[in-house]
Image (tube, helix red, strand yellow):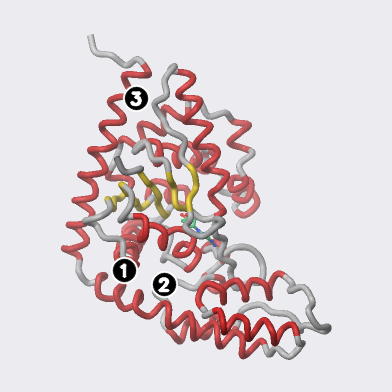
Amino acid sequence: MKETVVSGIRPTGKLHLGNYFGAVTNFVKMQYDYNCFFFIADLHSLTTHPTPQDLHGYVKHVLVEYLACGIDPEQSTIYIQSDVPEVAELYLYLNMNAYLGELERSTSFKDKIRSQPNNVNAGLLTYPALMAADILIHRASKVPVGKDQEQHLEMTRTFGNRFNRLYNSEYFVEPFAFNYAKNLVKVPGLDGKGKMSKSEGDGNCIYLSDSPEIIRKKLLRAVTDSGPSVENQTKPEAIQNLFDLMNIVSSPDTIAHYDALYNNVAIRYGDLKKQIAEDMIIFNSPIRERIEELSKDNSYLRKVAEQGAVKARESAQKTMKEVRALIGFKSF
Ligand code: AMP
């Protein structure tokens, strides 16, 4: 039997290159070898309090972009998280055995406390329990995600194992983060520090739907420094980030060429940025064109979402029936 794979993305805007290289590119490859469930994590996105119109628009973006990237709804189950209410039920049960101390230690929770001190809601605190429910509901063993999700995967294993111990079973398998690359991926942003992230603003992200003009503009504004002063010096974070971006879109020859220029103190950052922009445009263009086409086809999108909801609920209902029996919910 094929191993089961689950992963999702929060609909908080358009997908960027971090989402693509951290997660979606793996979804596309995995769908032929595994039993795959790829969802749109709209319940998770409620922590940011979107308006109903924004929420619907963002869900559509992710659905369209999943399809534009090459996820095939005949190979994989693509679904919207809120179409599967069993996920919320499992989340409730997992919350009963998730402890305040461990939830408060989550790095992403600590980041949120810092970045949005006026909206530290319980949904943010219990985010790892909802993510665990997403994965355990299909009893998945592999989860294609970026490096930023590693800690959440560890918590998922903790919650699954705790459930198993509590109910004296071996029901949940241990899921592990997965990437076809040797290591989990962290795509840097354009602001010279940290990962590409929507919460750092649009200027920090290259979206899959960005036009060539926008990509060129964003790259020109990317943070650099005054340039190397001695040969073979270690690259500071902002420059290493640009080379990391080049690594994902440019050819090995191009990368070697700019690396040599840097090491010989002959690099011109303007040229480096232009090269990255042009290579990103070559990479993005076919996806962007498919996004434009698919966005117009609401009846196809509806069909995909409906078909996905049926398949995902079937799997989730089977799990929940067994989970309820293990917990001890019985009819008289
Ligand atoms: P999120 O936007 O937090 O729902 O993330 C969706 C997926 O994209 C998760 O698998 C993340 O690990 C991945 N992801 C988001 N940003 C990055 C990044 N900068 N580098 C690598 N993966 C990322």
Of mark 1 and mark 2, the one earlier in the sequence is 1
* Residue 156 on image: x %, y %: 49, 37
In the image, taking residue 327 as reference, residue 153 lies left or right, namely right
Q: CA distance from mark 3 to mark 1?
A: 36 Å
Q: Look at label 1 and name its amino acid.
A: Ala
In the image, taking residue 99 as reference, residue 94 lies left or right, namely left
Residue beneath the point at 45% across and 71% down: 207
Say whether marks 1 and 2 touch (CB < 8 Å). yes
Residue at disc 1, secondary structure = helix
* Residue 122 on image: x %, y %: 52, 38
In the image, taking residue 264 as reference, residue 289 lies left or right, namely left
| Residue count near mark 3 (Cα–Cα under 10 Å), binned few <14, some 14–19, many ≥20 | some
| Residue count near mark 1 (Cα–Cα under 10 Å), binned few <14, some 14–19, many ≥20 | many
Vertical side of 312 occupied by 12: above or below: below
Q: CA distance from mark 1 to mark 2?
A: 10 Å
Q: Nearer the viewer, residue 16 or 42?
A: 16
* Residue that label 2 marks: 208
Of mark 3 and mark 2, the one earlier in the sequence is 2
Residue at disc 3, secondary structure = helix
* Residue 141 on image: x %, y %: 42, 41
Of mark 3 and mark 1, the one earlier in the sequence is 1
* Residue that label 3 marks: 323
Q: Which mark is residue 68?
A: 1
* Residue 69 on image: x %, y %: 34, 67
Q: CA distance from mark 3 to mark 2?
A: 39 Å
Q: Look at label 3 and name its amino acid.
A: Val
